[in-house]
Image: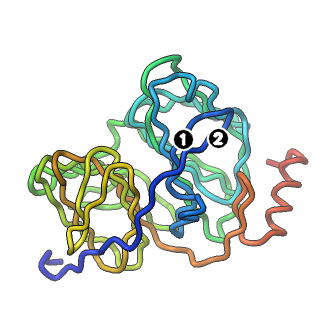
Amino acid sequence: MDGSTLTPRPIARQVRGVPVSDGAGVKLNRLIGTPQLDQVDPFLMLDEFRSDEAADYIAGFPEHPHRGFETVTYMLAGRMRHADNKGHEGRLDAGSVQWMTAGRGIVHSEMPEQEDGLMWGFQLWVNLPAKDKLTAPRYQEIAPAAIPTAQLPGGVTAKVIAGIVAGVTGPINGIATAPVMLDIALPADGAVTLPLAASHAVFLYPFMGDITVGPSATRLSHGNLAVLGAGDSVRIAAAGGAARVLLVAGRPLNEPVARYGPFVMNTPQEIRQAAMDFQAGRF
């Protein structure tokens, strides 16, 4: 598609993160899943964890259940070890991604494997369609070297975790919502326009530096999340210096959402069943 025929998406809404504590006391910045922004269908929650104070993260996320959705962990700095009740265990290092499809149920833990230094990254919750809520759990664990980088005009680069950018395909596959997940680095004065399916919901989060977005070059400051409006592309430019941006897009499910803690289903009855199944040891 010729860039001149693209319709860049404007910013439809901006929100600031909310400080929360989760797990055994880990301090987080919650960007999606708050009273200000409940969800961006199919995305249910986005947390940023960032601290070089061990007390903010050392207690980690002890054993807990999930059913009915997917968790995505993207590490920027630090090390986390995960283990589950299926006998699966591994370590997430800086630059790595874990895409876990909880499906019908899993019990796992995520604990820091460091006692000092910076711990920084994101956890995203992605809803599953009703037909896949009770699918078998699975992991896609991607080492940093397996995440390809797309070289874009003007010195812009994009780590492609999921989706396709400039002919570069991310390693995550087989996800019902056809997600796009990019870590975009813009040099000072860098700009890029990326085609994106008009059917997808899109959000942006500049986690380093400020950017401008869309046809009106609306400024989006570091630490603010923007939900984009209608269009078939995203235009981003650095504002006042280099920037890094998390771009996430996915096909909305347009299904009812019933959620209670670590369970996300379609009806309250399914939530009650999830709780009973967990208590009965059926996860």
* Dot label at residue 22: 2
Does the CB distance between marks 1 and 2 fall below 8 Å? Answer: yes
Crowding at mark 1 (Cα within 10 Å: few <14, some 14-19, many 20+): many
The quadrant of the image that shows the N terminus is bottom left
**48 to 164, vertically: above or below:** above
Residue type marked 1? Leu
* Residue at the spot of label 1: 28
Q: Residue 76 occupies which quadrant of the picture?
A: top left
Q: Earlier in the sequence, mark 1 or mark 2?
A: 2
Q: Which mark is residue 111?
A: none
**Amino acid under label 2?**
Asp
Residue shown at the point (30%, 61%) measured from the top left? 164
Q: Nearer the viewer, residue 274 or 258?
A: 258
Task: Find residue 276 and report its image quarter.
Answer: bottom right
Left or right: residue 95 versus residue 37 is left
Which residue is at 74% across, 58% downward? Answer: 260
